[in-house]
Image: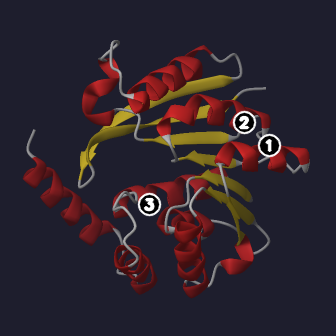
């Protein structure tokens, strides 16, 4: 594995295909200044989220795992003016940074940040009987991904797109005896994804500035 080459290629692709965007850069800088962990999606991945949401024609998006709002901004920019993105974040500090970044990007009217354990927020959201979400992005604590998947299906409709990040974990997902709860949670999530009667899914390995990882993609069936 050549991380330097991956980094160089990622930078080239981002410089070639993604227009300079000060508000996006400001969000990353604010996250770093606030001491948030540098685990945001890469710029090319953020643009991929944006394009997938546009292809989906998403009007309602659910994001589990806000951090500083970098991916939130990419997703919210894909929404129409009357769309909505609900994003769930455990840490109040992270949510405050995200709120500031989203406001600076001019997207506050589209984004509803909910703070607290995601499973509690999902239960409360479900109790509100919301309209189904068109696009759901899972990028929070990996041990709970199997639970997040079940909630995602309940909050979806036929045709909803579900995307999960960090599902390869440098290849450790093939280690059946792993005691890492992130690996175990990811393996259970992938197995549930493949066996779920209402989902049609695949997963892709990725390399780049975020190292060796991957994402899983599923469509909710009728």
Judge by depth and name the residue closer to the eye, 84 or 117: 117
Q: Name the disc covering residue 46, or none.
A: 3
Front-most of 185 and 198?
185
| 175 left or right, relative to 47 | left
Name the residue tied to disc 2: 151
Give percent across and percent down for residue 180.
36, 27
The local secondary structure at tag 3 comes to helix
**Which quarter of the rendered picture does the N terminus lie within?**
top left
Alpha carbons under labels 3 and 2: distance apart:
23 Å
| Labelled pair 1, 2 in contact (Cβ < 8 Å) | yes
- Frontmost of labels 1 and 3 is 1
Residue ID at (31%, 39%): 213
Q: Mark 3 or mark 2, which is nearer to you? A: 2
Mark 1 or mark 3, earlier in chain? 3
Above or below, 139 relative to 154: below
* Residue 46 occupies quadrant: bottom left
For the question of whether residue 159 can be seen, the reply is no
Q: Provide the residue designation for mark 1.
A: 123
Give the residue at x 58% y 75%.
Answer: 96
Percent x, y of residue 131: 86, 50
């Amino acid at each position: 594995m050549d991380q330097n080459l991956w980094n160089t290629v990622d930078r080239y692709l981002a410089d070639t295909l993604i227009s300079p965007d000060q508000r996006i850069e400001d969000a990353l800088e604010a996250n770093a200044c606030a001491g948030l962990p540098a685990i945001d999606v890469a710029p090319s991945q953020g643009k991929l989220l944006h394009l997938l949401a546009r292809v989906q024609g998403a009007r309602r998006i659910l994001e589990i795992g806000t951090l500083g709002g970098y991916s939130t901004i990419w997703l919210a920019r894909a929404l129409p003016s009357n769309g909505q993105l609900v994003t769930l974040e455990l840490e109040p500090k992270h949510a405050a940074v995200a709120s500031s970044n989203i406001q600076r990007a001019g997207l506050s009217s589209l984004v509803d940040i909910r703070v607290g354990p995601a499973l509690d927020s999902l239960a409360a959201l479900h109790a509100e009987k919301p309209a189904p979400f068109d696009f759901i992005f899972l990028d929070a604590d990996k041990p709970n991904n199997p639970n997040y998947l079940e909630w995602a299906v309940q909050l979806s409709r036929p045709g909803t797109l579900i995307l999960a990040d960090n599902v390869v974990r440098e290849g450790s997902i093939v280690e059946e005896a792993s005691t890492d709860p992130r690996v175990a949670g990811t393996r259970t999530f992938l197995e549930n994804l493949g066996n779920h009667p209402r989902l049609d899914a695949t997963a892709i390995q990725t390399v780049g500035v975020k190292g060796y990882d991957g994402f899983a993609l599923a469509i909710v069936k009728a």
